[in-house]
Amino acid sequence: MSAGNPTGLSRREFLAVSLAAGGGMLIGFPLAGRTQTPTPLPAPSAFIRIDRSGRVTLILPYVEMGQGSYTAQAQILAEELEVALDAVTLQAAPAAQVYASPILGEQITGGSFSLRGAWATMRLAAAAARTMLIDTAAQRWRVRAASCRAENGRVIHSGGRSFSYGELADDAARRPVPAAPTLKAVDAFRVVGQPRKRLDSPAKINGTALFGIDMRPDGVLHAMVQACPVLGGRLVSVDPAPAMSVKGVRQVVKIDDAVAVVADHTWAALKGLRALSPQWDEGANRNLTTADMVAAADAALARTGLVFTNTGDVAKAEASAARRFEATYRMPMLAHAAMEPLTCTVKVADGRCDVWVGSQVVGRAHKAAAEAAGLPPDSVSVHNQYLGGAFGRRLETDYVSQAVLIAKQVKSPLKVTWSREEDMQHDYFRFHNHSLVSVAVDSTGQPQSWRHRVVAPNIMARWFPGFQKDGIDLDAVDAAAGPYDIPNVVVEFTRNEAPAGVNTGNWRGVGPTRNVFVVESAIDELAHAAGRDPLAYRQALMSKAPRARAALELAGRESQWGTALPARTGRGVAVFEAFGSHLAMVAQVNVSRTGHARVERVVCAVDTGIAVNPDIVRAQIEGGVIYGVSAVLYGRVTMDKGRVQQRNFDTYPVVRMNEAPKIDVYIVPSTAEPGGVGEPGTSGVIAAVVNAVYAATGKRLRTLPIDPAQLRNA
Amino acid sequence: MPYSINVNGAVREVDVDADTPMLWVLRDVVGLTGTKYGCGVAMCGACTIHVDGKARRACFTPVSNVGSAQIRTIETLHETAVGQALQRAWRELDVVQCGYCQSGQLMSAAALLEANPRPSDDDIDMVMAGNICRCGTYGRIRAGIHLAARYLNESTTGSGQ
Ligand code: FES
Ligand code: FES
């Protein structure tokens, strides 16, 4: 990356340098990406503080939910500021509108945005601070700044004398902000690009890391909650007596759609809850089944949608095609099933409300808590904790509002915990997604046109209205045409909402997870129909996607693509661009005579731009792959009589150690801006596995998850 | 009724119903929150503790069943040689992601290594299949167990010389 200003903004417009409270230097900057220059210019959302002892604190609006972003961001700062990585302390910013991610417009950790938002502006802010520290030292010594350098938290003169940053910080804070601070050249990086150890590991291996569920404010009581089992239903009445006779139970609390039992400990609360027989108004969904929702999505497939992409002339290409390929793909409803069930601890007292929670959207959690408490926002504090996984579930704040509504009725601080069953049955589900793909093919089997009708809910209309265009959910159509040279393309969005009361939301890998399955399945079918090798077929169509193609070639080599495999074993490939990263995956799958698919190995090649911490990149891809393998093998939430039928990990199985494939991640060296890596592992592996099942059995599965019955003796 | 239990070397009095699982006794009554709730039905392993050195799911171990047994939780795992080796390996390989399942993973792995100092991949699968990790750290857990076994082996051969 060349030196200069990657944001397109001049530093005066976005850097705010001041004396820190208690002395030292405070540099505020927005976490803006270069692709979207926001107007008006954003307020600072992250801060670097250099105190008089030389300690550096990075205050970030993000939370650590397992993706290692804290560590990677500390690396970027250490690099550009010229301090040791262990000299940097990280602090999560409290919730406030000022801590807003300008890519997404507010405080959100999701969609692999954390690092992408930080890269450009944090480097520039740190480079400005470094320049100001050097200038301060040069002035004190009355030498030219060019004769000084910054190194390991000190400014050093060519003659050998030096000042620590702490000694310079107060004066540096008073200097003018430099017009064009020079960024370090990529080839001079010594911290960025290194597999440094995660900063959060130690606390997470000795039981001291505190998650939302671990909060114990003085006098805390414990509640378990049950919402109406029919989604969207209401509580009519409940006799508290059976719960009150359980030892340790203190109170039964009713809210509009749920009942909670408050007790001295969680077990008493759970026993109390199980003893109750609430009367529910089951509402409009009392007869809802999965078959109804699948039929509705199928019906939507016949409706013309809003046109998102329209290039070339698809109708003309179709009219002159040698053949037409048409296929429908169906994806089920999915739960998130993060390891830590939803939980929120609340203290309402003296006109104030304190909330301890693990949230991906701290600003929204704050707003939700204030509304539920009926208090002005500045009487509410949200204390964000480690998240025991999120995968999109903790982008919602329903569990925060609910906990506040319950806690308001209780005199003591209250921890509300959802049972695993409650967590699974009252999710913001990934909803049924169907797709219709229609491709015109010439006599050699080359695609001449691509038509993809995306049937999905418009999640963004509710969750983030700014990420829509003319009524189209821009996430739902992300990566819906693939990285291929196809001259004529139409992508349509046909909105299909869940019945009211069935909540739908973002699920790991979001839009690309649905679309890469569709695109990479269809391309695979086209390759086989043309009698071509599926990898070579893709490669020949990727002249405009050199980075993805290079990843494809690397994954092919490392997976020994094309070499012989045992019977009923096959390799499948997927290649795509999403979240600013370019990936290819090859899955190797064995299918037993009984139809059981075993994912043996997954080779991933990733071009994510500069891999700030390559080991964290690998870990994120590995984790994304496992999450996707769980989905392709098992993931399905079904409903009957308006109730979710899955309850726990017996009925919603996930991949375990004995089923975990060997995963090899290869990183393509790159000097481009970093892309996201938390999501795409999940997005790619589903298609790779389905394509491998085809290679192993000759059976094409267009409906997820894999149905062993269809593979028996196939 | 009150029970007297022995947790991490200290005797604790807890006044709860007989069927109260150790998970909630530890977390809510004793105040040791390192042991995690994941499923409540012995299907995820997040709550794994040691009862007289054996791995047990705390969510399925009623307080009335433990008697005077020695209970160890993640908070004192580092007091054992196996625990130290595992924690060192976990850091060396940066196993954790969100970290929520890792107390249980480490407790299961420790019981495995105590019983079988040189486990094969199949041995690891057999024991560790009871511990879910939704962040997908399985490959690193497996490598971490092998690495810890190596550390332990090196230190025993070292002290013997
Ligand atoms: S909480 Fe005990 S095994 Fe899941
Ligand atoms: S590290 Fe998150 S569940 Fe295992």
Image (spheres, coloured by chain):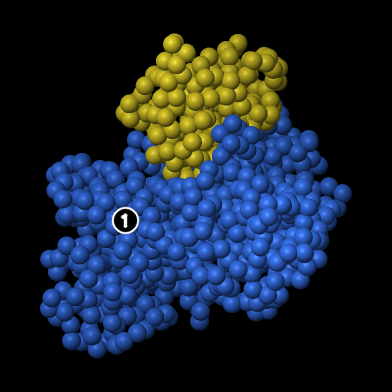
Chain colours: A blue, B yellow
- Residue A31 appearing in the image: no
The answer to whether A137 is drawn above or below residue A325 in the figure is above
The residue at 60%/59% (across/down) is A80
Left or right of A627? Residue B50 is right
Left or right of A209? Residue A330 is left
Query: Percent x, y for residue A37?
Result: 59, 77
The residue at 49%/28% (across/down) is B86
Query: Percent x, y for residue A668?
Result: 37, 58
Asked if the beta carbon under badge 1 is closer than 8 A to the nearest atom of ligand 2, the reply is no
Q: In this rendered view, identify the residue nearer to me: A14 or A326.
A: A14
Left or right of A466? Residue A610 is left
The residue at 17%/41% (across/down) is A593
The answer to whether A390 is drawn above or below residue A607 in the figure is above
Which quadrant of the view contains residue A251? top right
Left or right of A203? Residue A580 is left
Residue bearing the label numbered 1: A585
Query: Percent x, y for residue A294?
Result: 37, 62
Q: Farthest residue in the front direction?
A: A159
Q: In this rendered view, identify the residue nearer to me: B147 or A182.
A: A182
Question: Badge 1: few (under 14), some or many (20 or more) residues near its Cα, within 10 Å?
Answer: many
Q: In this rendered view, identify the residue nearer to me: A289 or A120.
A: A120
Secondary structure beneath label 1: strand
Which quadrant of the view contains residue A213? top right
Report the amino acid beneath label 1.
Met
Output the chain of dot 1. A
Query: Percent x, y for residue A295?
Result: 36, 65
- Residue B157 appearing in the image: yes
